[in-house]
Amino acid sequence: MTTAHQQEIVQLLKQIIEPTLNNDIVSLGMVRNLRIVDDYIYLRLYIGSHQHQLQPEIQSKLSFLSWCKKTYIQICTIPGVRTTLGISSGKGGVGKSTTAVNIAAALQLQGAKVGLLDADVYGPNIPQMLGLGKADIQVINTPTGDKFLPLKAQGIKIMSVGLLAEANRPLAWRGPVLHKIITQFLQDVEWGELDYLLIDLPPGTGDAQITIIQESPICGVILVTTPQQVAVADVRRNIYMFRQVGVPVLGIIENMSYLICGDCGSRTPIFGSGGGEQLAAELLAPLLGQIPIDPRICSGGDTGNPIAISEQASPASEVFRKIAIAIGLSFAHRT
């Protein structure tokens, strides 16, 4: 009977369409932890700051269930943040963090208010990539308790687990400590008003990744890969993890796609070709961009000047700009 009731609930919830993304709230992964206890329904609703109207819609829709006495909805959101996006990869070394920084920079240049949460506990390099030296994290008192105050660089608000660690020391945190720190960074940061919060996820499919996905209102992920089949195989494992929790893949970015000859302008696929296109076809998700190999991407990350800002006329910067425009069109934000 419980299984039948659960299917009945899911079918009703699938009738509720999120207008910006033009899809139902179940397919978008916004409804999680659905439980039925006796004649009561319990669920978590993961939303952005502009989506609170979905709660009364759910209450109204489920009121048609004759057997249900009451529906309890736990709202999970990050105050002030409209859209939370995950930037993920199946393996390390594909340029995920560099890509996240440059997407954030490109979105900011488009006029969006952007935050970047560096949750890559195994390699928190984003402070360096944005030119932040050693800086203490301030804690401020708010009506909802003490909150971390994010730092700001290149017009982007930043919070990173790397700011909690000593220089050149590994982040050797065990599961429970890691879970607590990640949860704090998701719930206890005073971001203010943001159009986008990008979360740079750790590579792979371990405890840290699962905690971030389950505890944050991520409305979708952007997957970063390189062209070769080894990277594509690892990304597929990542995709399975996201599907388990119902978080949609919004697009694919292929990094290190080709090298542009400085003399003739021809493209050479140093690491092979076709990986990003293959994944996009499998997932029926757009290939948002193919980023060329450019030494200035690396030097920009080392010096804290992302290429999307410092070399806006470069081919790589143009790709990041197109990715930012595609994201903006997907969510139709007005700043």
Image: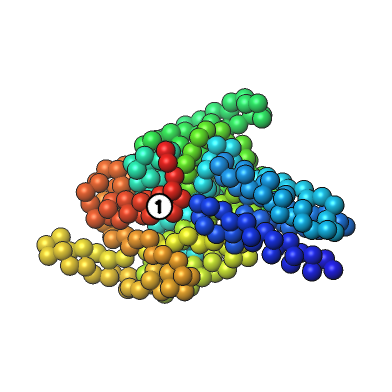
Establish if 270 lies above or below 186.
below
Establish if 83 lies above or below 271.
above
From the top left corner, tell me how far across and down residue 194 is, in percent: 49, 38
Taking the view exactly as shown, the residue that stands out farthest to the right is 38
Q: Is residue 71 left or right of residue 246?
A: right
Establish if 13 lies above or below 168.
below
From the top left corner, tell me how far across and down residue 201 is, in percent: 52, 53
Check disc 1 and give the amino acid type: Leu
Residue at 41% over, 65% down: 286
Circle 1 Cα neighbour tier, 10 Å, few/some/many (<14 / 14–19 / ≥20): few
Q: How many marks?
A: 1
From the top left corner, tell me how far across and down residue 115 is, in percent: 47, 41
Residue at 43% over, 69% down: 280
Residue at 28% over, 51% down: 317
Residue at 62% over, 25% down: 141
From the top left corner, tell me how far across and down residue 38 is, in percent: 88, 57
Mark 1 residue element: helix
Q: Quadrant of the N terminus?
A: bottom right
Q: Nearer the viewer, residue 122 or 114?
A: 114
Q: Which residue is mark 1?
A: 329
